[in-house]
Amino acid sequence: MPTYDYVCDGCGHAFELFQSMTDKAKKTCPECKKPKLRRLIGTGGAIVFKGSGFYKTDYRSESYKKGAAAESGGGKPDSGGSKKSDAGGAKGGSSGSGSAAKD
């Protein structure tokens, strides 16, 4: 059940009322008893996701990841180490690691 905001145009009294969506809007102010009450249009409730994101693969177990890698023919997931040595070899012709060649 939502919470509705009401304001009285007669006395300026503003309040929130917790009522069913099927209930009719209130018309009489509880403070001054005048029929000048109106329901305000609010933003409504919303789902708020906080954080970097939510993906269906966020909660996969290690055994699932290993099985998926084996099915794709990769064996182990690539950590990016081989890409770094390939890039170092293309730059200076060194086949060793990039940090050893720079020292």
Image: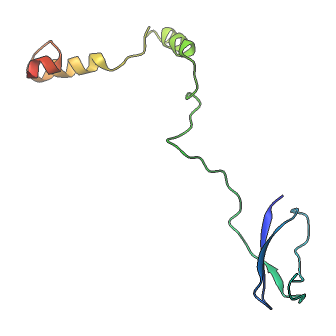
Q: Residue furthest front?
A: 31
The answer to which quarter of the image holds residue 13 is: bottom right
Exactly how many numbered labels are in the figure? 0
Q: Residue at x 27, y 20 (%)?
A: 83
Look at the image and name its color scheme: rainbow
Residue 91, position in %: x, y? 12, 24
Q: Residue at x 79, y 90 (%)?
A: 11
Pick the front one: 96 or 18: 18
Q: Quadrant of the N terminus?
A: bottom right
Q: Is residue 12 left or right of residue 30?
A: left
Using the image, determine if residue 16 lies above or below residue 64. Answer: below
Residue 20, position in %: x, y? 88, 62
Pick the front one: 16 or 94: 16
Using the image, determine if residue 87 lies above or below residue 76. Answer: below
Residue 90, position in %: x, y? 15, 21
The answer to which quarter of the image holds residue 22 is: bottom right
Using the image, determine if residue 48 lies above or below residue 22. Answer: above
Q: Is residue 69 left or right of residue 37?
A: left
Residue 5, position in %: x, y? 76, 72
Q: Quadrant of the C terminus?
A: top left
Q: Residue at x 73, y 72 (%)?
A: 41
